[in-house]
């Protein structure tokens, strides 16, 4: 007998057609979950916590993540497994945010959603929810994403399709030691996301000038810099100067690759040497979602500690 908790936040899995397109509708997921339980897990109990209002996941914010973290921590003592139903558009961000916020969770926390509304022909809502409830009832103790028949690592998923039912891929880990180091670089027992932080994801594009990059970085507390390929960027020394100056002034910048697989290797090319000397954090093969949420939590921790900030690059750069 497993005591399960379902936290329903919204998303297509709980939507129906309305006058302005698909929108959340109360009780769709709740009724579906109860019927799945009666059919597949008759010995288990189910508590349901539905957000009010239910949201399209385009409205997810750091405060939403904090609410989820509080709910999971508070209920982990009295439940054996937790399922979170979530819209697919920002599911990969929330999954990574939960992964870093719940590193020591001792219960399965399974995030799922669907690409088609429950009443659509060949909807994936029931299949995904049923698989998530089963994984929560007796699965691995970690935050995981259940989607289209696969259980995936929460910090490695990316949404790759806006139409296919198999909408998520798990990007393989390149360097487990690095991922572990970057994940565990926190002193807080119950980390939460600072809702005031100004963090942006900046994608390098041909023709971007150093001045434009500098302007984009100026108002920020942190930035995820999506470089080309294995970590290259324009060789103009002005780029390195901008990065160096911003890092020196306290901006945390984490560099990752625009490529889905492989990550960055600063210094492999002359055009990536600047990354080695600029104080930018080597994000190795982190996904954009993982880099963004990890950087957010790292900066949130620092603000909470209210102590002189440590140089972020010194704690996360690979040996
Ligand atoms: N717009 C929806 C959401 O993210 C898409 C989905 O759930 O598939 O909430």
Image (tube, grey):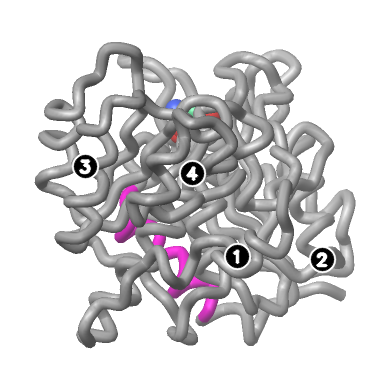
- Residue 139 lies in quadrant: bottom right
Q: Which residues are magenta?
A: 61-73
Label 4 – label 1 distance at C-alpha: 24 Å
First reached walking from the N terminus: tag 4 or tag 1: 4
- The tag on residue 14 is none
For the stretch drawn in magenta, what is the main secondary structure? helix
- Pointer 4: what residue? 289
Residue where numbered disc 1 is placed: 319
Q: Which residue is mark 3?
A: 241
Looking at the image, is 25 positioned above or below residue 35? above
Please indicate whether residue 181 sits to the left or right of residue 151 in the image.
left
Q: Which sits earlier in the primary sequence, circle 4 or circle 3?
A: 3
Disc 2 beta carbon < 8 A from ligand 1?
A: no
Q: Could you say whether the residue bearing mark 1 is in a helix, strand or loop?
A: loop
Q: Residues within 10 Å of mark 3 (few under 14, many from 20)?
A: some
Residue in the image at 33% along x and 56% along y? 62
Residue 38 placement, left or right of 202: right
Towards the viewer: 128 or 290? 290
Residue 28 showing in the rendered view = no
Identify the image quadrant of residue 137: bottom right
The Cα atoms of the two marked residues, 3 and 2, are separated by 46 Å
Q: Secondary structure at mark 2?
A: loop
> Mark 1 or mark 3, which is nearer the start of the sequence?
3
Residue 107 vs residue 64: left or right? right
Q: Is residue 73 above or below residue 194?
A: below
The image position of residue 229, as x and y in percent, is 55, 26
- Is residue 300 positioned above or below 230 on the image? below
Magenta span includes 38: no
Where residue 158 sits: x, y (%)?
Answer: 60, 35
């Amino acid at each position: 007998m497993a005591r399960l908790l379902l936290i329903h936040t919204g998303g297509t899995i709980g939507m129906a057609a309305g006058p302005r397109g698909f929108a959340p509708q109360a009780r769709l997921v709740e009724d579906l979950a109860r019927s799945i339980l009666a059919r597949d897990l008759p010995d288990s109990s189910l508590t349901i916590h539905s957000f009010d209002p239910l949201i399209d996941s385009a409205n997810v914010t750091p405060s939403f993540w904090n609410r989820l973290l509080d709910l999971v921590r508070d209920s982990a003592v009295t439940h054996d497994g937790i399922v979170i139903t979530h819209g697919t558009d920002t599911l990969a961000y929330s999954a990574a945010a939960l992964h870093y916020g719940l590193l020591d969770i001792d219960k399965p926390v399974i995030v799922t959603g669907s690409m088609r509304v429950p009443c659509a022909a060949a909807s994936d809502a029931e299949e995904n929810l049923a698989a998530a409830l089963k994984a929560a009832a007796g699965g691995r103790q970690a935050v995981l994403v259940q989607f289209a028949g696969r259980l995936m690592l929460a910090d490695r998923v990316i949404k790759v399709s806006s139409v296919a039912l198999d909408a998520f891929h798990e990007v393989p880990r390149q360097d487990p030691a690095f991922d572990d180091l970057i994940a565990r670089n926190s002193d807080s027992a119950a980390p939460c996301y600072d809702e005031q932080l100004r963090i942006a994801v900046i994608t390098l594009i041909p023709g971007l000038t150093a001045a434009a990059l500098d302007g984009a970085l100026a108002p920020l507390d942190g930035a995820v810099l999506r470089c080309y390929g294995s970590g290259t960027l324009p060789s103009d020394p002005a780029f390195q100067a901008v990065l160096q100056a911003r890092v020196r002034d306290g901006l945390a910048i984490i560099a990752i690759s625009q490529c889905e697989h492989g990550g960055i290797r600063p210094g492999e090319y002359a055009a990536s040497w600047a990354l080695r000397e600029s104080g930018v954090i080597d994000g190795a093969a982190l996904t954009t979602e993982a880099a963004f949420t990890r950087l957010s939590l790292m900066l949130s921790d620092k603000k909470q500690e209210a102590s002189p900030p440590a140089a972020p690059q010194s704690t996360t750069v690979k040996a």
